[in-house]
Image: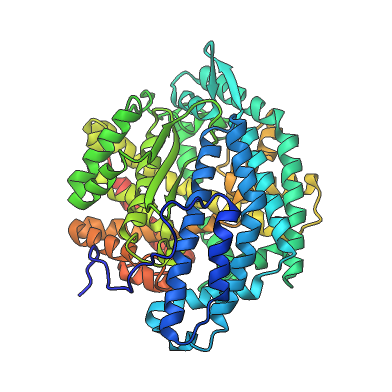
Amino acid sequence: MTTATTPAKHPPASSFVPAELDGAKWENLAPYYEQLIGRTVHDAAALERLLLDRSELDACAEEAAANLYIEMTRHTDDKLAQQRYLAFVENVEPELKKVGFALDRKVVECPFAAQLDQQRYGVLLRGLRRSVELFREANIPLETETTKLDQQYSEVNGAMTVEFDGQERTLPQMARYLEETDRARRQASWEAVAKRRLQDADRIDDLFTKMVGIRHQTALNAGFRNYRDFQHARLQRFDYTPADCERFHEGAEKVCVPLLRRLNAERAAAMGLAASELRPWDLKVDMKGRGPLKPFDGATQLVDRSSAIFHVMDAELGAMFDSMRIGDCLDLESRKGKAPGGYQYQRQRSRLPFIFMNAAGLHRDVITMVHEAGHAFHSLLCAHDPLVAYRGSPMEFAEVASMSMELLTFPHLEKFYSAEDANRARRDHLESLSTMLPWIATIDAFQHWVYTNPTHTRKDREQYWVHLNERFGPAVSYAGHEDSLRTMWQRQLHIFGLPFYYIEYGIAQLGALQMWLQAKRDPKQALANYKKGLSLGASKPLPELFRASGLDFSFGPETMGRLMDDVGRELTSLPA
């Protein structure tokens, strides 16, 4: 019997690829892919062996891509790292897409595919069929071009710094000033960052305009009317549609926006301001005038305190987290030349996770740390699977792994804070859900409009963004800073490099809230359910992954309303 942490019995792993093969060079990979394409498949067992051998080869190539991407984002000012990454994008990725299509077609057209165990291979075969349906060789150079444009976006952002307090600071490092109690100082810091972003706003807008045009053409090439519908299909969203996403938008508007605006009205009153006087630099400061939360000093302390939380929660989680202290698995602190944001990247051949973030000593860094650790736990819990396609999961469930961990760590925040500050952190996090879900709806709705109206102008785009802010935004005055409001979407890196990968955060947040409510009733059982679902990787359809974790796969207004009611009750019980 399989448990959450005991791997199921699968066919033996492949030894097809030499351990020393350098997957960063196409000439090294090509002979092995050619062998697979030319291999005769005479029965279902031979087809299964082909899948396993291909998986190992794909893992070799994916790890090479991961390492090059990691180095590029760690050092956007390192020309050699940029060149190596671009060389892979231009010379290896196009060839991988071609042979990938050939192998996908070889598998789905094989007469023995139907004889495979469908409980084991059904999800994989479904995905391969979709990939074959959508593949167009003409799209390969177009996708290469958008990847290069996204790399330029990372370079532009990685170079952004401001002079403040007599020092050059990265934009993530500037975030801490928005928590200071001196309003004039908060305003000065916000305006310094806004001014710096506007210096590159035209350049970023030009990059995005090029992306939109190229992506629209890829959709037309594949027989779709627009890129939104094409991308939903390519992301293999078998279990929901763009119309379901619009129901999420509706739920955010009806359930969360009123709560968000009520909380902001209370914030303004507590700060002695009229509601119309609340400004963007007033949203992070403590309403009672308390200083910023200070959870840690430096990356070592962040790691130590996170480790302590995971060990208290569960011995296995603690051991998995500690395993990342070796093997170059962590790059946490913000510095000049480092790309923005945070991510976890699984290096698929060594099966070692990598966590990247821009820590600056803020509470949000704690959230990012446990969020990305959740992704790493997911990678490690399904790392046993010999199929690289199953050593992950649909993004909607991958984010359940990370967002659940943000909430499951709630009872243990005293590892970072005093009891009073821990309650402050819990309240801040729960209140932030009223901001986060509308923001997710804003980003997703923005992309729906952008790609279903591909001939729009820059002015059209700005006007639609302002309209969405009026629909979903926090009722904050941008008087005098209208240009910053119109270009605010530029800070969301997903729009550039991961189009339409954002609604997943909203779907997953509703799953994570359900996991949190489980944990409030029975923490041990909730963690068992959490690990059970994560250990399945991508081997089951999305609704089954949710069910395995004891969660409902539902994200309309009714579900959102019920869960936010629970959040409201919890906020009532927490000290202000």
Q: Where's residue 120, x and y in %?
A: 38, 78
- Identify the residue at image location x=37%, y=34%: 363
Rendered residue at 69%/45% (across/down): 149
Residue 173 versus residue 376: which sits nearer the camera?
376
Residue 174 position within the rendered picture, expressed as x and y whole percent measured from the top left:
51, 25
Q: Give whichever of 245, 250 is nearer the camera.
A: 245
Whether 420 is drawn above or below 226: the answer is: above
Q: In this view, does 163 lie above or below 100?
A: above
Q: Can residue 452 be seen in this view?
A: no
Q: Residue at x 50, y 78 (%)?
A: 125
Task: Return the x and y of residue 507 as percentages of the image width and height.
Answer: 46, 61
- Quadrant where the C terminus sits is top left
Q: Which image quadrant is residue 493 in?
A: top right
Question: Which quarter of the figure has residue 156?
Answer: top right
Residue occupying the point 22% across, 68% down: 3
Residue 159 in the figure: left or right of residue 215: left
Judged from this view, the residue extending furthest toward the top is 166
Say which of 484 and 339 sits in front: 339
Q: Is residue 274 above or below residue 229?
A: above
Q: Locate residue 229: give its quadrant.
A: bottom right
Answer left or right for 449 relative to 295: right
Locate the N terminus and report the quarter of the image it occupies.
Answer: bottom left
